[in-house]
Amino acid sequence: MSRLLPIMAVLLMLQGCAGAVMVGAVGGAMMVNDERSFQTQLDDTNADFMISSELAKLEDVNNQANITGVVMNGNTLMIGQSPNSMLRDKAIRAVQSLKIGGKIHNQIRIGNPTSFTTRSNDTWITTKVKSRMLNTDNLDVTRIKVITENGEVFLLGVVARDQVELAVDVARNTAGVRKVIKVFVSPSS
């Protein structure tokens, strides 16, 4: 039951939203096509919520940094900005204490948190990358998660090597992308 709470919370937040139908359809397609088991998908989603909750408890990190975590197949990608290594390391330790399992990929940059304008631009870059992926032959975009942070595009998923190469090529050749970082896992044979 505790694993279903995050999913139910998201559904309640989306209730009555016209976009919820599309999100539900795309999300459902992604869950069906995902190489991860349904249980792993639920565990990853639950871990995302646990990380957000744990980071929210760190008042100094919340006030001075912009740090988030995303879990894919039990591995955690930590992204954002911290004004110093002390706050970055505090956030990493907090996530390690959750014992999610898998590896923690620390991609938190030392520097000032990004502005609203930069974050809006990142959202636009993510949209452009996903749109271009949708229009790329032989690329299954439902298995790839795209996250943009300060012009850096992070590609996550459980996909075959040929899919990785196509996805990286699309992202790398999208306007506004400064760097592409791959956090892919090969599917089980």
Image (cartoon, rainbow, N blue to C red):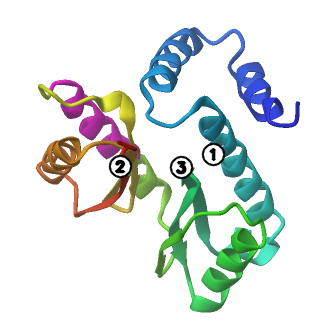
The residue carrying pointer 1 sits among few (fewer than 14), some (14 to 19) or many (20 or more) residues within 10 Å by Cα, namely: many
Q: Position of residue 116 (x, y in %)?
A: 49, 55
Q: Earlier in the sequence, mark 1 or mark 2?
A: 1
Please state which of the two labelled residues, at mark 2 or mark 3, is closer to the viewer.
3
- Tell whether label 1 touches label 3 (CB within 8 Å): yes
Identify the disc placed on residue 80: none
Amino acid identity at mark 1: Asp
Question: Gap between marks 3 and 1, in whole Å?
Answer: 6 Å
The residue shown at (56%, 33%) is: 37
Which residue is labeled 2 in the image? 121
Q: Earlier in the sequence, mark 2 or mark 3?
A: 3
Amino acid identity at mark 3: Asn
Which residue is labeled 3 in the image? 73
Q: Which residues are magenta?
A: 123-135
Which residue is labeled 1 in the image? 44
Q: Is residue 96 magenta?
A: no
Which is nearer the eye, 173 or 65? 173
